[in-house]
Image: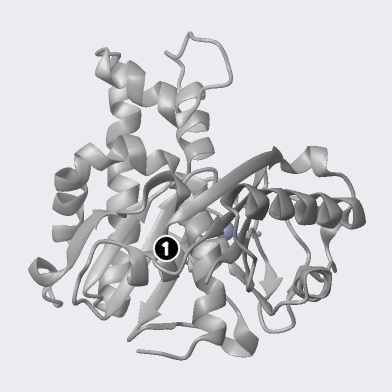
Amino acid sequence: MAIGAIDIGGSKIAVGVVDASGRLLAKSETATQSAGAYPEAIQRIATMLREAAARANVPVQGIGIGSTGPIDPIAGKFLHLDTIPQWSGGTPVADLAREFRVSAAIENDADAGALAEASWGAPRTKTRLIYVTVGTGIGSGMIFDGHLYRGVDGAHPEVAHQVLDAYGPPCSCGLRGCWEALAAGPAMAQWMESQPEYDGPPGLTARRIYELDAQGDPLATRTVEREIFWLGIGLANLVNLFAPDAILLSGSVMKGAGRHLDRIWQVMRQGCKFVPLEKVELSLASLGEDANLIGAARVWHHRFQKHG
Ligand SMILES: [Zn+2]
């Protein structure tokens, strides 16, 4: 049983083939913006998937897609995509299902990552998992008792837009001081570059800030401390709202923040007094860089294979 996996992000598209145990058999990537308008892009993705299946030497028996949002997972459709507006209204599920004559399904990319961690990640008996990915934005997926949590009309909850500082920096959603506007990678860079003592070039990245912190740059250290604070506050809210068994963290910003998990935990401890925080597992996700791509395959299993 090999499933074609497609991970559509604002900057890159990854296509692969994943076996029944979650092992990635073949993979290729392309820049999203180079894929062109929707009809050409879907053809390009189909070609990449055929090539990956040929390299893995397996037939594709189903297709799973994880995508930047917002999407309609039930209709299999892109809604008004924030990062790739020219694809809005596209129907990748129907188009790829027809092209390969197999069943296909789509979910938000963080939901895909959450599904993969819950089923193919490090073994755990936990039943209420929240997966949080912090990179260019903040994404989250919630798995309760093996099922992906959906909101009204199939909607994906937007934990990135929980407001932590109502008079904070403006956010793409229209409010101010959302978690994403305070703690995603670009927010770290913007904050550091806006400080009067910053004298470096523009174009900082989270990775560079962590490097500078490791080299003893005092402003970078303050930026990392601020990041730990806002990550901790957002996570404390999730614990207070959902009292989950585990929160799994991934994404490019968490790569650097991962070694500060104990300090993030200290921030959470200041405000999670009425839930048993000490029983909540806070750890880095186990599937690494390809979690979202592997998760795309898991989307197919979750939709079409009803099992425990
Ligand atoms: Zn927002």
Residue at image coords 55%, 11%: 201
Q: How many marks?
A: 1
Q: From this viewpoint, which residue is outermost toward the front?
A: 57
Residue 131 pos. (x, y %): 37, 64
Res 143 → quadrant: bottom left
| Other residues around mark 1 within 10 Å, as few (<14) / some (14–19) / many (≥20) | many
Tell me which image quadrant ligand 1 sits in. Answer: bottom right
Please report the residue visible at 32 percent of the width from the left and 77 percent of the height from the top: 241
Examine the rendered structure and indicate whether residue 218 appears above or below residue 64. Answer: above
Badge 1 amino acid: Gly
| Residue 263 appears left or right of 108 | left
Q: Nearer the viewer, residue 189 or 28?
A: 28
Q: Position of residue 38 (x, y in %)?
A: 87, 56
Please name the residue shown 71% across and 77% down the image. 102
SS category of the residue bearing label 1: loop
Residue situated in front as seen by the camera: 151 or 236: 151
Mark 1 beta carbon near ligand 1 (under 8 Å):
no
Is there any visible trace of residue 76 in the rendered image? Answer: yes
- Confirm whether residue 9 shows in the render: no
Q: Quadrant of residue 268?
A: bottom left
Residue wearing tag 1 = 22
For the C terminus, which image quadrant?
A: bottom left
- The x, y position of residue 98, in whole percent, is 83, 75
Q: Is residue 197 left or right of residue 67?
A: left
Above or below residue 281? Residue 126 is: below
Q: Is residue 7 above or below residue 63?
A: above
The residue at the point 49 percent across, 9 percent down is 200
Where's residue 287, x and y in %?
36, 53
